[in-house]
Image (spheres, rainbow, N blue to C red):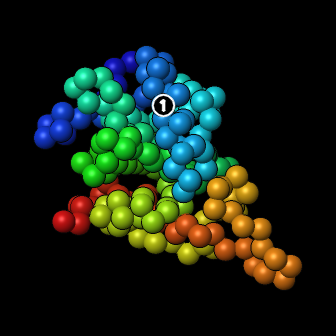
């Protein structure tokens, strides 16, 4: 199957859906998610599954180095898809790779999944990208209940004290319409 590919010519970046030939990048991406400290880490096994099931997009440069990654990390029964695993290598940050991979993946997945809600639980870094792409914030009550089950795996999770109500420290965003609008400049 031929995979879609677009480019960011300024930095010699190419973006595409990850597949079997790209499994060589899995250890590095997994390491990035483990060291980020702001997200649920993705194991090599989970990343390989995402790659092989057409749920990951990657950015590479002209030297064949992995630059950035994003994925649909969870598919929920009630027509929700969770966007996550957005990471960029330290040497490539602030050059548009994360925005490129985000928009590419969201455009592809929104076309393939009409009627489904694509959302992200964004940290302070990814929030900036999603705001730039005009993604509206969601109320936590608008996010499917199952999404909160993974919170206990998050490095930022703090178990509520007796009588406290759990609140996620990340902000939910609705990404379903990102491809239909323009970017904020």
Residue displayed at 18% across by 65% down: 185
Q: 64 left or right of 153?
A: left
Give the total number of marks visible in the rendering. 1
Q: Position of residue 110 (x, y in %)?
A: 42, 48
Residue displayed at 49% across by 62% down: 122
**Residue 114 vertical position relative to residue 140 in the rendered view, above or below:** above
Q: Position of residue 101 (x, y in %)?
A: 34, 43
| Quadrant of the image occupied by residue 168 | bottom right
Q: Residues within 10 Å of mark 1 (few under 14, many from 20)?
A: some
Task: Tell which residue pokes out farthest to the right in this image.
Answer: 162
Residue displayed at 35% across by 60% down: 129
Q: Secondary structure at mark 1?
A: helix
Task: Tell which residue pokes out farthest to the bottom in this image.
Answer: 163
Residue 29 visible = yes
Q: Quadrant of the N terminus?
A: top left
- What residue does disc 1 label? 28
């Amino acid at each position: 199957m031929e995979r879609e590919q677009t480019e960011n010519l300024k930095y010699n970046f190419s973006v595409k859906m990850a597949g079997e030939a790209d499994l060589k990048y899995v250890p590095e991406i997994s390491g990035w998610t483990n060291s980020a400290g702001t997200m649920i880490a993705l194991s090599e096994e989970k990343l390989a599954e995402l790659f092989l099931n057409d749920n990951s997009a990657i950015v590479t440069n002209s030297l064949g180095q992995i630059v950035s990654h994003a994925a649909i990390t969870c598919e929920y029964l009630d027509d929700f898809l969770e966007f996550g695993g957005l990471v960029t290598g330290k040497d490539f940050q602030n050059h548009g790779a994360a925005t490129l991979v985000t928009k590419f993946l969201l455009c592809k997945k929104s076309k393939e999944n009409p009627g489904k809600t694509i959302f992200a639980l964004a940290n302070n870094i990814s929030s900036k990208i999603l705001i730039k792409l005009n993604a509206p914030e969601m109320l936590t009550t608008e996010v499917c209940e199952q999404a909160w089950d993974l919170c206990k795996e998050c490095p930022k999770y703090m178990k509520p004290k007796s009588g406290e109500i759990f609140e996620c420290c990340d902000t939910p965003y609705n990404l379903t319409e990102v491809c239909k609008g323009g970017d904020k400049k």
